[in-house]
Image: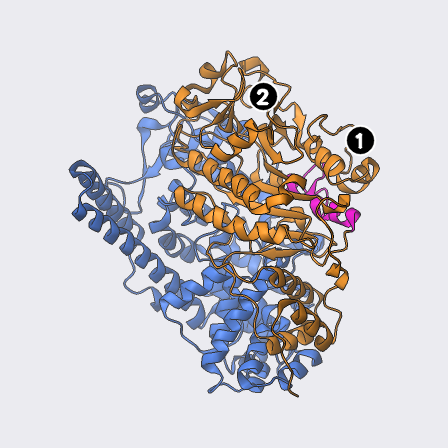
Chain colours: A orange, B blue
């Protein structure tokens, strides 16, 4: 049998549906929605900072009278700081984020942590991603459950930037992944045969159909790297070119509503540096993600929120090797058109030895779920009851952070 | 046609069959697996001419001295060229090492042994993602993992922790007892990283019952365990530097360890291997790796009991594993990792890729040898490897391999020789109906049955 190929992305999707012999993608995505419309149009990008970011080096409480003494050799010099008020300063690597902060489109939430209080990266990331009050308390991710409740009529409501889907986005709702090094889809004839063959294996079937959905939107980018690693100027440039395509995918009217991005390299046990160095480089990469997202999203920026969070913080004092060990509270960075920005949200716990968690870590005073709940309810328009029942179990006494989203 | 047990033996415990191998395995699948648990397989001709740990440490130190000299002479064209050459050499060595590791698995008459090497190498992850560890990670597997795969867990743990790759990867080489002579003089201190990961990832497991105080106690015991950069030790690359060892008694998990220098951590590591949490943790990992993403509690318990009974004798645990009914049931439950998928393809086809192409394949699929993203190692779970993009990359590799092989391999024969015992009618008919031999071959390589085990 010969098959006629039609060479435009959209008709290709239709073609595959009709020839593939199976319902590949629900085609509700055809309708075009205007920018300002429905609440279902809002976008949320969650940046997972793996390895435990040193929040005290990102947003620095230089006005705390104990800061210099307790941080010791890890205290940042004035030249590394850009004050945002008379108490907090941003590390100077945050050029773009600092600009957004000034224009009221970005904020910092400080002394924040998940409910997890031990110091294992892997359990802590599990809590950060599954949304339960303890490790492995849920089998799927809170973002996927949010998509389930939102029930938006697009083909790929969730997008993981990277080859694999992080737990935060895993679950019942089919989500896509896109990674910059992709070679694109195989030829149509092979694709159809593969669809046939995978019809007997649900996991392979769903992986292939989501890949096709994503590639219909973004068929071009070509750059290396599985999980985006931080770095120096190259890290920054790489992030910017990746985000260019990611922004295009997200800003499609039928694009994903929730996207995840992962940045590793935060586990700075040794030689993390001060004004410059490994940590400063990683800050610059993260900063580039914020700046590039704003540029790439264009008018969609006004209905997008970007939140960067990590699994826990690091010790207040430096260790013996120019680094910091696993701690508790850190900070979260949030930006977007709808953020009530230009301020640091913090119930500051203080840095006196007696005020530290177990005498060594920044004491957590805000639950990261408060931030997430503010985003889910005030930005994505979910009902409080749904959030409590389906998204963050056992979080009845965790209130959305007031005033964060305007 | 061969049996399902032969398919399980070849894929679940090996890297997939070579041409004609399924029939051989089928004579007695369990014996085929057990017969490979033989210490002579620790040595492979694939590693001929590659350096041992101490040589690499000395080479790295020579480079360090050269770099220092270059720093002193400034940013000249000649220095830039030298630096480029050094980096090129480092990269070249790494690619050669990664290819040697893969060939050892592809060509081995004992793929089961090689699977165990990869399993334990992943359990004791050291990663080239850290610059200082990069030159050492391959030698770590050769010098630490391979000789101990059939021995005692306690011996492997000790060798792994003392190896320069581990000491640098988890920062212990720089950890200094704050009250030691060296600590007082330099004002430097402890680094908890290695101690924490020993407890969390190598022995007890995260819920194994230790506290932050235990982490600190073990970190103190480990002060002084460092890399023999001067080349004055016994030639293993390890040396104990008493001048930075934290003095005093250290209580760990309710046991008091009096001041005893290097022997403190040595004793503590041994005691950790005899802890019930360690037996449970290792049993769970083995079951997840070899049997199922969600093994039964009963299977884990049986393995843990075997581990405890034998005091960590690994041969005994493997025998128990192979005697579990679950080990021989429910084929296709697990998805091969990219590493294992690539090795399966090469075994099945007899293809040999040149080093650079091999390196590109691993990079494309997101699992470069010796380069796990964190000390927890690579995931053992199918869901972490079966994203849409990841599947497309596998299909891409299947396609390019098929493009070069379709003239000499018949798709129907390859199907029988690899997934014959488990191939579904859907897969068979897709292969039969393919538009070309290359497409048919691609479909066999990309079939769920070929990618599962």
Please indicate whether residue A153 sits to the left or right of residue A269 in the image: right
- Element type where label 2 sits in the image: loop
Looking at the rendered structure, which numbered label has been put on residue A358? Answer: 2
Please indicate whether residue B307 sits to the left or right of residue A395 in the image: left
Q: Please tell me which residue is depicted at 35% across the width and 44% down the height of the picture.
A: B132
Q: Please tell me which residue is depicted at 54% across the width and 13% down the height of the picture.
A: A352
Which is more toward the observer, A277 or A100? Answer: A100
The number of discs equals: 2
**How many neighbours does mark 1 have within 10 angstroms: few (below 14), some (14-19), or many (20 or more)?**
few
Q: Chain of mark 2?
A: A
In percent of width and height, residue A165 lies at 62, 53
Is the residue under label 2 in contact with that under label 1 (CB below 8 Å)? no
The range drawn in magenta is: A126-151
Q: Please tell me which residue is depicted at 55% across the width and 77% down the height of the picture.
A: B442
- C-alpha gap between disc 1 and disc 2: 26 Å
Please indicate whether residue A225 sits to the left or right of residue B133 in the image: right
Which is more toward the observer, B125 or A268? Answer: A268
The earlier-in-sequence mark between 1 and 2 is 2
Which is more toward the observer, B203 or A395? Answer: A395
**Res B229 quadrant in image:** top left
**Res B98 quadrant in image:** bottom left
State the quadrant of the N terminus of chain B. bottom right
Looking at the rendered structure, which numbered label has been put on residue A245? Answer: none
**Res A311 quadrant in image:** top right
In percent of width and height, residue B96 lies at 34, 62
Q: Chain of mark 1?
A: A
Looking at the rendered structure, which numbered label has been put on residue A396? Answer: 1
Residue B176 in view here: yes
Looking at the rendered image, the disc whose residue lies closer to the viewer, 1 or 2, is: 1
**Residue A144 lies within the magenta run:** yes
State the quadrant of the C terminus of chain B. bottom right
In percent of width and height, residue B156 lies at 45, 49
């Amino acid at each position: 049998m010969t098959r006629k190929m039609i060479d435009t992305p959209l008709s290709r999707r239709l073609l595959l549906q009709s020839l593939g012999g199976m319902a590949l993608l629900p085609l509700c995505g055809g309708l075009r929605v205007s920018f300002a419309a429905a609440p279902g149009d809002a976008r949320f990008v969650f940046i997972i900072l793996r390895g435990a970011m040193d929040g005290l080096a990102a947003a620095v409480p230089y006005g705390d009278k104990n800061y210099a003494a307790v941080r010791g050799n890890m205290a940042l010099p004035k030249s590394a700081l850009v004050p945002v008020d008379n108490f907090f300063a941003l590390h100077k690597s945050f050029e773009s984020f600092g600009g957004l902060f000034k224009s009221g489109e970005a904020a910092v939430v400080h002394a924040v942590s998940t409910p997890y209080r031990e110091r294992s990266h892997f359990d802590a990331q599990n809590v950060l991603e599954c949304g339960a009050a303890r490790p492995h308390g849920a089998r799927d991710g809170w973002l996927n459950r949010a998509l389930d409740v939102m029930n938006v009529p697009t083909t790929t409501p969730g997008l993981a930037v990277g080859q694999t889907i992080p737990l935060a986005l895993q679950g019942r709702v089919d989500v896509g992944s896109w990674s910059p090094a992709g070679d694109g889809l195989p030829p149509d004839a092979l694709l159809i045969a593969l669809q046939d063959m995978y019809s007997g294996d649900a996991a392979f079937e769903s992986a292939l159909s989501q890949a096709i959905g994503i590639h219909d939107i973004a068929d071009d980018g070509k750059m290396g790297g599985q999980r985006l690693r931080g770095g120096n100027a190259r890290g920054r440039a790489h992030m910017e070119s990746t985000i260019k395509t990611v922004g295009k995918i997200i800003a499609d009217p039928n694009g994903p509503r929730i996207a995840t991005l992962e940045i590793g390299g935060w586990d700075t046990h040794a030689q993390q540096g001060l004004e410059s160095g490994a940590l400063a480089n990683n800050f610059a990469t993260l900063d580039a993600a914020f700046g590039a997202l704003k540029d790439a999203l264009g008018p969609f920026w006004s209905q997008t929120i970007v939140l960067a969070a990590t699994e826990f913080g690091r010790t207040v004092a430096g260790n013996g090797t120019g680094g910091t060990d696993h701690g508790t509270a850190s900070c979260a960075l949030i930006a977007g058109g709808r953020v009530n920005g230009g301020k640091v949200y913090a119930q500051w716990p203080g840095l006196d030895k007696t005020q530290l968690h177990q005498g060594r870590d920044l004491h957590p005073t805000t639950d990261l779920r408060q931030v997430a709940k503010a985003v889910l309810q005030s930005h994505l328009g979910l009902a409080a009851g749904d959030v409590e029942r389906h998204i963050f179990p056992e979080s009845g006494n965790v209130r959305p952070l007031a005033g964060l989203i305007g | 046609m061969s049996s399902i047990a032969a398919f399980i033996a070849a894929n679940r415990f090996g890297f997939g069959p070579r041409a004609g191998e399924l029939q051989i395995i089928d004579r007695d699948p369990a014996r085929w697996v057990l017969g490979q648990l033989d210490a002579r397989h620790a040595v492979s001709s694939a590693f001929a001419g590659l350096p041992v740990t101490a040589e690499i440490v000395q080479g790295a130190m020579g480079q360090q001295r050269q770099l220092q000299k270059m720093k002193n002479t400034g940013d000249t064209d000649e220095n830039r060229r030298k630096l480029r050459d050094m980096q090129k050499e480092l990269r070249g060595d790494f690619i050669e090492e990664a290819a040697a590791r893969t060939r050892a698995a592809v060509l081995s008459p004992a793929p089961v042994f090689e699977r165990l090497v990869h399993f334990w190498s992943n359990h004791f992850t050291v990663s080239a993602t850290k610059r200082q560890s990069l030159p050492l990670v391959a030698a770590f597997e050769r010098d630490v993992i391979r000789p101990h795969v059939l021995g005692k867990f306690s011996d492997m743990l000790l060798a792994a922790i003392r190896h320069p790759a581990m000491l640098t990867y988890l920062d212990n080489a720089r950890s200094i007892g704050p009250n030691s002579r060296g600590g007082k003089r330099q004002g430097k201190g402890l680094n908890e990283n290695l101690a924490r990961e020993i407890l969390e990832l190598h022995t007890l497991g995260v819920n194994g019952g230790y506290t932050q105080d235990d982490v600190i106690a073990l970190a103190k015991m480990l002060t002084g365990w460092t890399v023999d950069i001067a080349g004055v030790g016994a030639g293993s690359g390890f040396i104990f530097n008493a001048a930075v060892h934290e003095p005093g008694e250290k209580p760990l998990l309710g046991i008091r360890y009096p001041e005893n220098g290097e022997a403190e951590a040595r004793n503590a590591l041994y005691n950790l291997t005899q802890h019930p949490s360690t037996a449970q943790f290792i049993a769970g990992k083995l079951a997840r790796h070899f049997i199922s993403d969600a093994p039964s509690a009963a299977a884990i318990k049986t393995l843990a009991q075997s581990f405890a009974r034998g005091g960590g004798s690994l041969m005994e645990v493997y025998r128990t594993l192979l005697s579990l009914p679950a080990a021989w049931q429910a084929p296709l439950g697990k998805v091969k990792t990219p590493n294992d998928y690539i090795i399966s393809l090469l075994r099945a086809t007899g293809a040999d890729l040149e080093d650079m192409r091999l390196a590109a394949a691993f990079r494309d699929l997101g699992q470069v040898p010796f380069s796990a993203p964190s000390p927890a190692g690579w995931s053992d779970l199918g869901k972490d490897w079966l994203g849409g993009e990841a599947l497309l990359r596998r299909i891409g590799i299947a396609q390019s391999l098929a493009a070069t092989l379709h003239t000499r391999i018949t798709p129907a024969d390859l199907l029988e020789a690899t997934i014959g015992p488990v191939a579904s009618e859907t897969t068979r008919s897709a292969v039969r109906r393919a538009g070309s031999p290359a497409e048919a071959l691609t479909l066999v390589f990309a079939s769920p049955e070929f990618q599962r085990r």
